[in-house]
Amino acid sequence: MNSRADLLSDALHRRAMDACDGIVWLALDGRAPDKQATSALRQGLLAREAVPVRLSHPQMDERLYPAWYRLDANRSTDSALLRLSVEIALDELDPQVLRQGGGRVLAGWLALPGSVPPGEVASHLGRQMIQRRHMRTLLLRLHDPAVLWWLWQWLDAAQRAALLGRMNAWWLLSPLGELHALERPSGAGVDTLALGERQWRDVFAIASLNQVLRSLDAPPDGQTLRMLHDAARRACEHGLTDTDDQAAFIRHSLQMHPQFDRHPLLQSLLQRRQPGEFYAALSAELDDAAWRQVQHDCTTLPPSA
């Protein structure tokens, strides 16, 4: 095991001991394929009873439900499985692995209250994953850390409490490869997670954000992640709804300048875009000289309001 995985595993073990006496629930995403790297982990879990996260969605096969497995970090066999899961979760963040597609198997590690049956906690999460919006039933993929990590940043305390329910904490790896704790806020919350319109726009941009992350040669730093999210929001404000189109816009903010769309050339291009026209096609009309001019001019832009 590499040293970084060792450090993360040790940190997770300490948190599990402090929060729940070493009892941690390993969460696996049922829709992610059984990659070769996870075969040893799955083999170690075969004899264990899985707690499924049942999803009342017409397109969801119950065989693909996410599942939770109880591990006791005080036992050597379980501790080894916990360490292996951390290594796999870290490997899944490699941009080259992400570009192969298929998603992330490791959804994270959960601290559950001993007084509440785990099936009850799983049922609550399953209900939050099924959302109704504009008369449609949507699956909010909370069990995908590539979705949950982004979404958590945009929720208020009451929404975070509604998402976790009776769960004490959910640990996952951020896109930076850091152990990130999603902890239930103190105080009373609401029973059902409900998102506002701006949050839904952010959710629909997660696919384009993750597409850009997969194209990077190395995991981004925190400043880059904030810049990508800001660019995704501006892409939505400009009326871009296609995932590939949003990703093209986000990449330009990364390659040219974080505020490249404030340049007069881009302002003109975006204003003349007609419904159904793709930003990627329109921006392809700009030659290399025009892009160099955009990049140069943007270095003198005053700070945005």
Image (tube, rainbow, N blue to C red):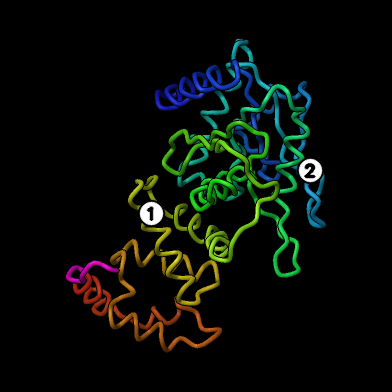
Q: Please give left or right for residue 287 compared with residue 24 in the image.
A: left
Element type at mark 2? loop
Q: Please give left or right for residue 52 compared with residue 184 in the image.
A: right
**Residues in magenta, as a range:** 299-305
Front residue (pair 195, 212): 195
Expressed as whole percent of the image width and height from the top left, the position of residue 191 reads: 70, 46
Residue in the picture at 44% in, 22% down: 6
Residue 187 in which image quadrant:
top right
Expressed as whole percent of the image width and height from the top left, the position of residue 236 reads: 49, 71
Where is mark 2, residue-wise? 54
Q: Please tell me whether residue 231 belongs to the stretch shown in magenta.
A: no
Under mark 2, the amino acid is Arg
Residue in the picture at 77% in, 21% down: 47
Front residue (pair 102, 66): 66
How far apart are the two marked residues, 2 and 1, measured between alpha carbons?
A: 33 Å
Q: Which mark is residue 250?
A: none
Residue in the picture at 34% in, 82% down: 267
- Disc nearer the start of the sequence (2/1): 2
Where is mark 1, residue-wise? 226
Residue 83 in which image quadrant:
top right
Other residues around mark 2 within 10 Å, as few (<14) / some (14–19) / many (≥20): many
97 up-or-down from 181: above or below: below
Residue in the picture at 66% in, 44% down: 32
